[in-house]
Image (tube, rainbow, N blue to C red):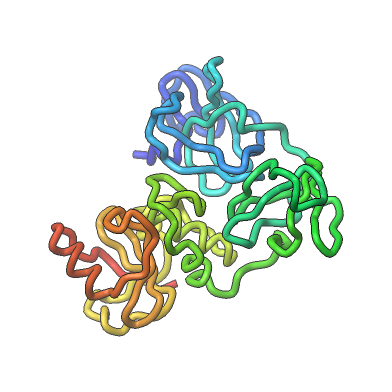
Amino acid sequence: MDDPRLTPARPDVAAKYLEGKVKAARFVNGEKCVVTDAIAPVRTAPRADAMLQTQALLGEHVTIYDRNGEGWAWGQLGSDGYVGWLPDHALGQPGAAVTHKVAAIRTFAFPGPSIKLPPAATLPLGATIAVNRTDDVFAMTDAGLFVPAQHLAPITDHAADFVAIAELFVGTPYLWGGKSSLGIDCSGLVQVALTASGVGAPRDSDMQEASLGATVPVTQLHQLRRGDLIFWKGHVAIVRDASTIVHANAYHMATAIEPIRDAVSRISAAGHEITSIKRL
């Protein structure tokens, strides 16, 4: 059975490309949109109190297959294929092609070329923008906003060490479904860090476990390398070195650096053993 998290199909409507593969009352091609808010929630239902599945960042492409007429749009993210409900106000028509991405943990977009102005938006690491021109201080976007140039990188640039990107998030509050320094979860941390280094990654930890890297025997827990991923049921951590990991977790309610031995013991005591170790 197709994973509903990645399959834009409901009994009443489904994506045209799924016709003949799923049952639905109608099939639609969908509308190409782009995320225009800094961070847009992707929820399980068209309600502000519905569970947060993931987040879409500024500049991300989304195909919308349905709107409920009450401010919510149902569609599929272009980056990782996740399906859910987004606020209509967070979406717009595609414009100029993105040229740059936010490479700092977060930055501000100002309405003019002055840091003394009240920021118009707070942009997360990984947000993408179209830059019209730059000077020594600011990059001006096609939306007329001014972003500190030193916080940006060309869209084609990739971080050399995805673990170092993950370490930037230490202290970030834990948020189920989160993907920014305002709140992030375990698999979101892995996805955001790998994306910054130019490696595509699925959204959820079970998807990551199934598709990323080569399996390292659990018996080699004492021989881990920086960048290895340790998986438990519903959880993933990133290895920093032979003795520590960095992971977003509900025990600390934050992204934290923790001794591997302590984490394995604590999680085992809660009833969960390591399910696999992956090396990228």
| Res 88 → quadrant | top right
What residue is shown at x 40% (from left), y 28% (from top)? 49
Would you place residue 9 above or below residue 255 in this image? above
What residue is shown at x 63% (from left), y 38% (from top)? 37
Asked whether 1 or 151 is in front, the reply is 151
| Res 222 → quadrant | bottom left
In the image, taking residue 111 as reference, residue 230 lies left or right, namely: left
Quadrant of the drawing holding the C terminus: bottom left
What residue is shown at x 55% (from left), y 38% (from top)? 40
Task: Give residue 250's position: percent from left, percent from top.
Answer: 30, 53
Task: Give residue 65's position: percent from left, percent from top.
Answer: 56, 27
**Tally of numbered discs:** 0
In the image, taking residue 251 as reference, residue 55 lies left or right, namely: right
In the image, taking residue 121 as reference, residue 240 lies left or right, namely: left
Quadrant of the drawing holding the N terminus: top left
Asked whether 29 or 173 is in front, the reply is 173
In the image, taking residue 222 as reference, residue 16 lies left or right, namely: right
Q: Is residue 185 visible?
A: yes
Q: Is residue 210 visible?
A: no
Task: Give residue 189's position: percent from left, percent from top.
Answer: 45, 58
Task: Give residue 100's position: percent from left, percent from top.
Answer: 73, 56
Q: Most extreme residue toward the front, as rendered? A: 116
Asked whether 113 or 129 is in front, the reply is 113
Would you place residue 63 above or below residue 279 in this image? above
What residue is shown at x 48% (from left), y 65% (from top)? 166
